[in-house]
Amino acid sequence: MALIKEYHNDQFNLTIADCYWKIELENGVTGGKEKLRVRMNCFKDKALADTNQNKFKDFDFQFVPDLASADNFLAQAYTYAKTLPEFTGAVDA
């Protein structure tokens, strides 16, 4: 589970299309019933993400999980991320 979305580096004014955004493996989700904090990592592609090396960027956000949802908290995090302006146009990987 991940998202596909471009990455833009402001420092170099460089945009890389179709990057792979996934929740960080360790400490990617912290919190509890009332609030979860999520850290997503951006990689050039899935192959690099699978090695967990050469990440471009981290992105942090938080949301309130729906405890009655059939979706687990990771699925909820990805769904919520797509509502944020930074992930407009993102698609599921």
Image (cartoon, rainbow, N blue to C red):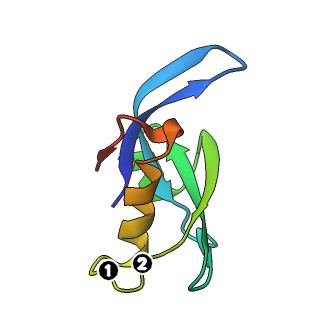
Residue 8 x, y percent position in the rendering:
56, 25
Q: Is residue 86 left or right of residue 17?
A: right
Secondary structure found at label 1: loop
Q: Which residue is mark 1?
A: 69
- In this rendering, the answer to whether 6 lies above or below 51 is above
Q: Residue 10 — which label?
A: none
> Measured from the top left, where is residue 50 in percent x and y?
42, 57
Residue at point 59% right, 45% down?
55
Location of residue 84 in the rendering, given as x and y in whole percent from the top left corner: 49, 45
Q: Look at 68% across and 15% down and name the residue there.
A: 12
The secondary element bearing badge 2 is classed as: loop
- Tell me where residue 20 sits by quadrant: top left
Point out the image quarter for the N terminus: bottom left
Give amino acid for label 2.
Asp
Image spot of residue 41 (x, y percent): 56, 51
Q: What kind of residue is marked 1?
A: Ser
Q: CA distance from mark 2 to mark 1?
A: 5 Å
Please state which of residues 11 and 65 is positioned toward the viewer in this rendering.
65
In the rendered structure, find residue 66 and report the number of the disc placed on it.
2
Along the viewing direction, whichever of 46 and 42 lies nearer the viewer: 42
Asked if labels 1 and 2 touch by Cβ distance under 8 angstroms, the answer is: yes
Picture mark count: 2
- Residue in the picture at 40% in, 48% down: 82
The picture quadrant where one finds residue 89 is: top left
**Residue at x-position 43% and y-position 57%:** 80
- The answer to whether 21 appears left or right of 35 in the picture is left
Lateral position of residue 6 relative to residue 14, left or right? left
Mark 2: few/some/many CA within 10 Å (<14, 14-19, 20+): some
Q: Quadrant of residue 19?
A: top left
In the orientation shown, which residue stands out farthest toward the top? 13
